[in-house]
Structures are given as structure tokens and as C-alpha cells.
Image: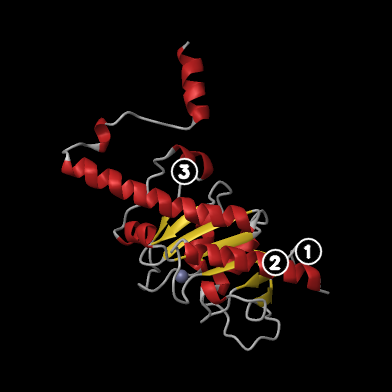
């Protein structure tokens, strides 16, 4: 039996996250999708197809069981429902997923480039955000391409070529912050790469950098 109070709370959290994506221009129109697991973990709340992030309400969000059964709803399920369910199945630590078509990150991925984790925060919070190519048939990425990447428990973010970004987390807030960091990092990387190209600098000539923990370990082994 699903807990109606938990469903309302999770819907409100999802609406907060969706509006934040819209306000930050991470997702316009009705693309992208996001979901969060109920506390009892037997079902999720997810944005349906055709509803914009800025138009999410308690009345249009869907409740879907982990086996794919959709609670009665007049809306079409998200095209990406299968990959959301797939990620919850492969990684029980994942409690929320935010997927949006943010332009800087999607631009990087569409050029066939993995976004470098070049800021201190990206190194600490993400570590690596794999680039997932289009499906072998040339269509959008499906559960078959996305789930295997997230089998690695260290992966919390990925970018889909010609498509968008994915952030996952133990809470919706954590997943939300990750899609914000992905986009911010892509923007910073673009500025860095454009300036370096304009000034004839090469990435290979830049100082090597790592996380604070790596720097500490390096100074300990040097002394
Ligand atoms: Zn999408």
C-alpha cells in the first residue's frame, strides 16, 4: 500500500527541482525528466511525457512501481521511464534522478567530448562524468546504453551525446545540484578551451591538479 503523505511530499520535492531547472535554464519546453523514489522504495514519482518542468503540479506527476506498473494517469509515461527504472534497479543507493537537456553540457557531448572535471568542486563531487554515445542504431540512448555505465558505484553523473545530462543521488537535492555542476563545468571548460586556443596554450603544458586528498597524499609521499 503506497503512503499518500509520502507521495505528496515527493511530488512537492520534484516540483521544487523541476522549477529550479527551469529557472536556471537547464531545461526549457517539455523535454527532460526527473524522478524520485518513495521512502518505502517500491515506487517512484516521475514527470510524465509532454509536461514542462515549469508546469509540474501534484496533479500531473505520475507514480510508477519499480516493475513498470503505472498508477492510473491521463498522461503518457516519459520516453525515458525505462532508463529511470533501470538505474534504480542496478543501484539501490540511487534515490533520485534528474535528466535535462542543458545546452553547454549537451554541446560538449554532441561534439563527442567528455566534459573535463576541471574545477575543484567537480573533482570532489563528481570525479568523472562519462560520455554515453547514441544507441548503436543512431537513436537516443536507452536503458541498454545507460545502466551499464552506472553499474560502477562511483559514477554519479553522465552526459548523453546529442541529448542531455544525468545526475543521480541519495536525495533529489543532491541529484539536482549535480546537473547544475555538470552544466557549470561545461561552461567553464568551454571558456578555458576557447581562451587557451586563442592564446596558443596547450592543456599538456598546464600544471597537473587533483583533489585535496590527492594533493595531501602526494605531499606525504614526497616528504
Ligand atoms: Zn532527454
| Rendered view: 147 above or below 204 | below
Q: What residue is at 39 percent from the left and 31 percent from the top?
A: 209
Instruction: Tell me the mark number nearer the camera, choosing from 2 and 1.
Output: 2
Q: Nearer the viewer, residue 76 or 131?
A: 76
Q: Nearer the viewer, residue 145 or 162?
A: 162
CA distance separating discs 2 and 1: 12 Å
Q: Which residue is mark 2?
A: 10
| Rendered view: 11 above or below 129 | below
Q: What residue is at 47 percent from the left and 17 percent from the top?
A: 219
CA distance separating discs 1 and 3: 31 Å
Q: Quadrant of residue 136?
A: bottom left
Element assignment for label 3: helix
Q: Position of residue 75 (x, y in %)?
A: 59, 86
The mark nearer the N terminus, 1 or 3, is 1
Indicate the colouring scheme.
Answer: secondary structure
| Rendered view: 174 above or below 163 | above
Q: What residue is at 51 percent from the left and 76 percent from the top?
A: 52
Q: Which residue is mark 1?
A: 40
Q: What residue is at 30 percent from the left and 50 percent from the top?
A: 190
Element assignment for label 2: helix
Quadrant of image for the N terminus: bottom right
Q: Position of residue 163 (x, y in %)?
A: 40, 67
- How many residues crowd mark 2 within 10 Å: few (<14), some (14–19), many (20+)? many
Q: Quadrant of residue 38?
A: bottom right
CA distance separating discs 2 and 3: 27 Å
Q: Position of residue 137 (x, y in %)?
A: 37, 73
Q: Which residue is mark 3?
A: 122
Q: Nearer the viewer, residue 155 or 183?
A: 183
Q: Can residue 130 be seen here?
A: no
Amino acid at each position: 500500500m503506497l503512503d499518500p503523505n509520502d507521495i505528496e511530499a515527493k511530488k512537492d520535492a520534484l516540483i521544487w527541482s523541476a522549477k529550479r531547472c527551469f529557472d536556471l535554464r537547464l531545461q526549457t519546453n517539455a523535454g527532460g525528466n526527473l524522478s524520485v523514489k518513495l521512502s518505502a522504495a517500491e515506487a517512484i514519482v516521475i514527470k510524465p511525457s509532454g509536461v514542462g518542468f515549469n508546469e509540474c503540479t501534484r496533479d500531473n506527476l505520475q507514480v510508477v512501481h519499480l516493475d513498470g506498473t503505472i498508477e492510473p494517469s491521463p498522461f503518457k509515461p516519459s520516453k525515458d521511464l525505462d532508463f529511470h527504472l533501470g538505474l534504480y534497479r542496478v543501484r539501490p543507493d540511487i534515490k533520485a534522478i534528474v535528466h535535462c537537456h542543458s545546452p553547454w553540457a549537451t554541446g560538449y557531448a554532441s561534439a563527442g567530448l567528455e566534459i573535463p572535471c576541471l574545477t575543484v568542486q567537480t573533482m570532489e563531487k563528481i570525479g568523472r562524468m562519462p560520455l554515453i554515445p547514441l544507441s548503436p542504431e543512431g537513436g537516443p540512448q536507452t536503458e541498454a546504453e545507460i545502466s551499464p555505465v552506472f553499474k560502477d558505484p562511483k559514477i554519479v553523473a553522465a552526459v548523453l551525446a546529442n541529448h542531455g545530462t544525468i545526475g543521480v543521488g541519495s536525495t533529489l537535492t543532491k541529484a539536482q545540484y549535480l546537473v547544475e555542476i555538470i552544466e557549470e563545468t561545461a561552461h567553464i571548460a568551454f571558456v578555458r578551451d576557447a581562451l587557451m586556443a586563442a592564446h596558443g596554450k596547450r592543456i599538456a603544458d598546464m600544471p597537473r591538479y587533483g583533489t585535496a586528498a590527492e594533493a595531501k597524499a602526494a605531499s606525504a609521499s614526497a616528504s
